[in-house]
Structure formats: C-alpha cells, structure tokens
Image: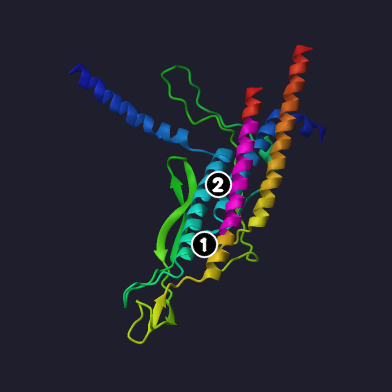
Amino acid sequence: MVDKVNNINVTQLLNTAMHHASVKQEIIAQNLAEANVPGAFAKTLANLDEKNFRRPARISLAVTSNIHLAGSPSMPNHSFRVEVDRDLSNMTPSGNNISVIEQTEALSRNNIDYSIYVDIYNKLRDLERKAIEG
Amino acid sequence: MGTNRYYILSIFVAILALPLISQATNKIGVEAAREKSSAALRANAERMNIIAENIANKDTTGIRPGEAPYRRKILFFGNQYDKSVGTNVVKVKRYDTDKKAFKIKYEPGHPAANEEGYVEYPNVDEVIEMLDAKETKRIYEANLDAYKISQAMIQKTYEIIRK
C-alpha cells in the first residue's frame, strides 16, 4: 500500500484530476446546451480511478530540427470513459432525458472540485518555491 | 519564372499546413465547454425571439376575406460541428411553421370574415407560448451559469501559468 502511495506523483495526479474536471465541464455544458433538443440523452463522465493516475504518458515524436513538424500537441493521454444515461424517469415527450436541475448541480460540484485542485496546485508550487528559496 | 515557382511552392506548403491549422483550432475541455454554452445561449435567444414573435402576432388576421392569418413559427435545434470554434455546438437547425388548424371566430363585421361571417385567427396558443418562454428562460440561465463557470475555470488556469 505504501509502495502504491509512493509511486503516485502529486503533480501528475493533480494534472489528471484537473483534466478530468475540464472534460467533465465540457460534457455538462453539452448536456445543458442539449436540454431542449429532442432525442438527446444525458452523458456522464466516469469517475477517476487508480488506472487514470497510473497510465503512462503517450510517447510523442521528438522534434530534433527546426524544419521538423511537431506531432500531435502534447496533451496528456487521459482517456476518460463517457457513459450515456439511459434513465427514463426524466424522459420528456420529445425523448430527451436531460434534467437541468441535475446538470446544474453537477456543474457546481465540478466547479468546486476544480477550485480545490487549483488551490492544491498553487500551494504545492508555493512549497516548492519556498524549498528552493530557503 | 522564379516568382511562379515560389507561388506554386507557397500553395503546396499551405495545403500541407491545412490539417495542422484545423487541429490547432480544435478546442477541448473547458474552452470547448465555454463555446458550447455560448452557442446554446445564442440558440435559446433565437427561440425566445420566435416565441415573442408568436405572442405578438396572436391576433394577426388577414385583412381581406379568405386571406390566411399569421401561422405559428417553430424552430428545431440540432448538434452541428462548428469549424470556427472547433467543436460540436447546438444551433438552430430548421425553421418551420405549425401545421395545426387555425382558430375560427364568428365576427361578421371583420374585413377578413368569409361569407358565413367566420374569421380565421392564428394557431397561436398563448399558454403554450408562455410555457415555452419559461422553459427557454430556465435553460438560458443554466447555460449562462455554465458559461460563467467555464470562464472562471479558464481564468484560474491562466493564473496558475502566470504565477
């Protein structure tokens, strides 16, 4: 267990968590945008688990000369699972099951999560700065 | 001759660079979220516009016998890829008119009355329009909240970079 904890890089962990919150924000925004689109189903992002934190970064092509074209942008290789909500309890006659209340609640929760990650990240950087400056 | 060669070369380079440019404009995460909310705000504002038009014209009849009154307008939303923002956004897909029958009132003195004295009135139901307006307002507000939160998240991220 201690080994598992030691293997976790805190910066990488925060990076993954912030990326997750960012993708979640996109999905919630999409759900809210489709709140009155007939036949639209709500989508949710699977919660973070250990696998997300341990996945190695994608190996990108090295740019060894100015005339080389860079490969894909250096985005973290986090593939989060998007699930479609098939719950029929919120279904409207137009075949839309997106609940504005639920999505707004998820929006607030995600915003709080993101703020926490940013706070921790800032504190971590302050700590590093203090350690360097002495 | 030399200028022509450079001209052809620049076109060739531009064609090669096109996929890279389109990749650069693709937005993901919070930025995409902001664009989606922004597009939804525009779409819902357009819906509100149509509702207002329907309510304003609820008594608009013809002015000559046999002339059709105002027909209720409706719009359909759909998800479309927007190149300018680089993500799928909700847009007004189609405008149409409600095919429901017109209301008929007995008003023999009306200029649009037929031989039997009946006048066709628009197929606009005020209650339905008001409910649609309420729903649109609620969804507009929810999207506005989402837009504000996405904007705040982007600012927080920029603050990390700035520090």
Residue placed furthest toward the top = A134
Name the spot of residue B146 as percent of width and height, x first: 61, 46
Mark 1 lies on residue: A38
Nearer to us in this view, A98 or A15 = A98
In the picture, the quarter occupied by the C terminus of chain B is top right
Q: Which residue is drawn at 65% across and 53% down?
A: A103
Classify B114 as above or below B38.
below
Classify B16 as above or below A90.
above
Examine the residues drawn in magenta and state their main secondary structure.
Answer: helix
Cα–Cα span, label 2 and label 1: 18 Å
Q: Which residue is drawn at 47% across and 40% down?
A: B85
Q: Can residue A125 be seen in this view?
A: yes
Residue placed furthest toward the bottom = B116
Which quadrant holds residue A19?
Answer: top right
Amino acid at pointer 2 = Ser
Nearer to us in this view, B5 or B148 = B148
Classify B39 as above or below B136.
above
Name the spot of residue A127 as percent of width and height, x first: 77, 21
Mark 2 lies on residue: B37
Nearer to us in this view, B81 or A86 = B81
Nearer to us in this view, A53 or B70 = B70
Q: Is residue A50 visible?
A: no
Q: Is disc 2 surrounded by few (<14), some (14 to 19) or many (20+) residues within 10 Å?
A: many
